[in-house]
Image (spheres, helix red, strand yellow):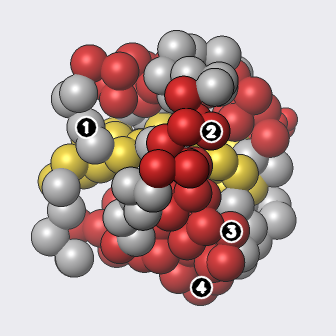
Amino acid sequence: MKVIIGSDHGGYALKQEIIEHLKSRGFEVTDVGTHSEESCDYPTYAKPVAEAIQKGEAELGILVCGTGIGMSMAANKEKGIRAALCHDTFSAKATREHNDANILCMGARVVGPGLALMIVDTFLDTPFSNDERHIRRISMYS
Ligand code: RB5
């Protein structure tokens, strides 16, 4: 599976840990940046991740900022994007099964790296349920 990932400065260190983890699991990872802890603007990185999902260049995306909130707000402005802010594994599983979320957002100032990697694994390993009622609900806002 191809995964695309981005962060701002607040999420940079966690993004690097996630990339290493995903590569060790055999995922093909595209990193749109940022590439340092120098201050930058999170929408700069939300946009290319969302566009790659829209174009089918990656199946799922991950966005990390300080809180995850700005990234989720920015990504959800893009058509066809269902970005879910998750700081627990229950939400990560449920949003794949129920919402067919295509981007996971997290806040590096909210969760530690151990939990963050468990959330990432849960999100990437959980398929959409394909349940008719969930398809109907998604179609009501997509
Ligand atoms: C940057 O300081 C911070 O505002 C950003 O990482 C994010 O939390 C915004 O939602």
Q: Position of residue 109 (x, y in %)?
A: 80, 61
Asked whether residue 131 appears in the rendered view, the answer is: yes
Judge the density around disc 1: few (<14), some (14-19), many (≥20) Cα neighbours within 10 Å.
many
Q: Amino acid at mark 4?
A: Gly
Nearer the camera: disc 4 or disc 3: 3
Q: Nearer the viewer, residue 142 or 5?
A: 142
Comes first in the chain, label 1 or label 2: 1
Task: Determine whether the beta carbon of the residue marked 4 sits less than 8 angstroms from the nearest atom of ligand 1.
Answer: no
Q: Which mark is residue 58?
A: 1
Q: Is residue 31 left or right of residue 43?
A: left
- In which quadrant is the C terminus drawn? top right
Q: Position of residue 17 (x, y in %)?
A: 45, 68
Q: Which residue is mark 3?
A: 91
Q: Residue at x 22, y 76 (%)?
A: 25
Q: Position of residue 62 (x, y in %)?
A: 48, 48
Q: CA distance from mark 4 to mark 1?
A: 25 Å
Q: Amino acid at mark 2?
A: Arg
Q: Which residue is mark 2?
A: 137
Nearer the camera: disc 3 or disc 2: 2
